[in-house]
Image (cartoon, rainbow, N blue to C red):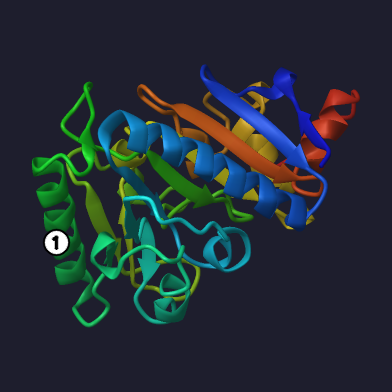
């Protein structure tokens, strides 16, 4: 497997970028990474608590199988209308009692409230860790994907949900992408994780990836890219990119002009 690390584009401290040739190599690399993080977590504290968003990330890339004591929160973000199947395609064979999914039989507001209660109970008994910097849950790994508009989880550009500080889980009813009703982790929870991985594939993600990562996009006129706001408090951030999604990064590295957002 050919893996390319792009050290010149490390976006922040404790960050890394890996560029893979294609989706098959990315799936393998991602599975190996999850396995490494899980083994460390289980050895250190007896559990591995992973949270991940649904959609193509689950369907295409998460192919890891385990018999270890994983605790899975399958619901960083959830569209209540059409993601039920994708949320059940999760990592197997984790025991059913170790998977905590969002209840899509409730209203979006009630589902968000109940899901936060579940997470708070897991933190209370330390199945999920707690951040040393704040009272947020500290997942061993949060796995995200970035879309062409730069959104992660269900946190969209310029949306008020980006400014929430005290809530762990919130809901939106005005998603620019269908379905309109969604539940999502807030940025403080995401940034409190020990490890965060963001996956991007396809040329349509290249511009969003560039503006999320490149140091040349700082300042008051920089575009509002939720993925750029992923800044681990005490953890590590790892980007998994295919060649297409990294194309603007590589072009800029070759001296080409910056793209416009």
Find residue 229 and report its horizontal and vertical position in percent.
46, 35
Q: Is residue 245 left or right of residue 113?
A: right
The quadrant in which residue 211 appears is top right
Find residue 93 and report its horizontal and vertical position in percent.
42, 66
| In this view, 116 is above or below 133 | below
- Residue at 61% x, 59% y: name it: 61
Q: Could you say which is closer to the camera, residue 186 or residue 138?
A: 138
Q: Is residue 191 left or right of residue 123?
A: right
- For the residue carrying disc 1, how many other residues have a C-alpha within 10 Å: few (<14), some (14-19), or many (20+)? some
Q: Is residue 140 left or right of residue 146?
A: left
The quadrant in which residue 118 appears is bottom left
Find residue 116 and report its horizontal and vertical position in percent.
17, 55
Name the element at disc 1: helix
Find residue 136 and report its horizontal and vertical position in percent.
21, 36
- Residue at 45% x, 66% y: name it: 92
| In this view, 43 is above or below 48 | above
- Residue at 29% x, 40% y: name it: 189
Provide the residue designation for mark 1.
113
Image quadrant containing the C terminus: top right
- Is residue 51 visible in this depiction of the protein? yes
Q: Could you say which is closer to the camera, residue 162 or residue 22?
A: 22
- Is residue 151 visible in this depiction of the protein? no
The quadrant in which residue 110 appears is bottom left
Image quadrant containing the N terminus: top right
| In this view, 20 is above or below 181 | above
């Amino acid at each position: 497997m050919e893996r390319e690390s792009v050290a010149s584009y490390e976006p922040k401290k404790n960050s890394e970028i890996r560029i893979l040739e294609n989706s098959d190599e990315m799936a393998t690399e991602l599975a190996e990474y999850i396995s490494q993080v899980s083994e460390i977590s289980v050895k250190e504290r007896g559990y591995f608590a992973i949270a991940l968003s649904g959609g193509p990330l689950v369907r295409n890339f998460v192919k890891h199988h385990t018999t270890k004591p994983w605790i899975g929160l399958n619901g960083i973000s959830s569209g209540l209308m059409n993601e039920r199947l994708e949320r059940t395609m999760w990592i197997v064979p984790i025991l059913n009692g170790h998977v905590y999914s969002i209840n899509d039989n409730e209203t979006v507001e009630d589902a968000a409230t109940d899901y936060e209660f579940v997470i708070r109970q897991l933190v209370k008994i330390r199945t999920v860790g707690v951040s040393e910097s704040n009272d947020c849950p500290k997942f061993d790994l949060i796995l995200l994907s970035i879309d062409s508009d730069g959104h992660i989880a269900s946190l969209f550009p310029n949306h008020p949900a980006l400014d929430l500080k005290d809530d762990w889980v919130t809901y939106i009813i005005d998603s620019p992408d269908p379905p309109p009703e969604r539940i999502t982790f807030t940025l403080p929870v995401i940034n409190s994780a020990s490890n965060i991985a963001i996956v991007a594939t396809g040329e349509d993600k290249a511009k969003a990836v560039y503006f999320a990562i490149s140091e040349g996009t700082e300042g008051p006129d920089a575009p509002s890219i939720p993925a750029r706001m992923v800044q681990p408090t005490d953890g590590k951030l790892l980007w998994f990119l295919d060649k297409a999604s990294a194309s603007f990064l590589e072009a800029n590295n070759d001296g080409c002009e910056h793209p416009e957002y």
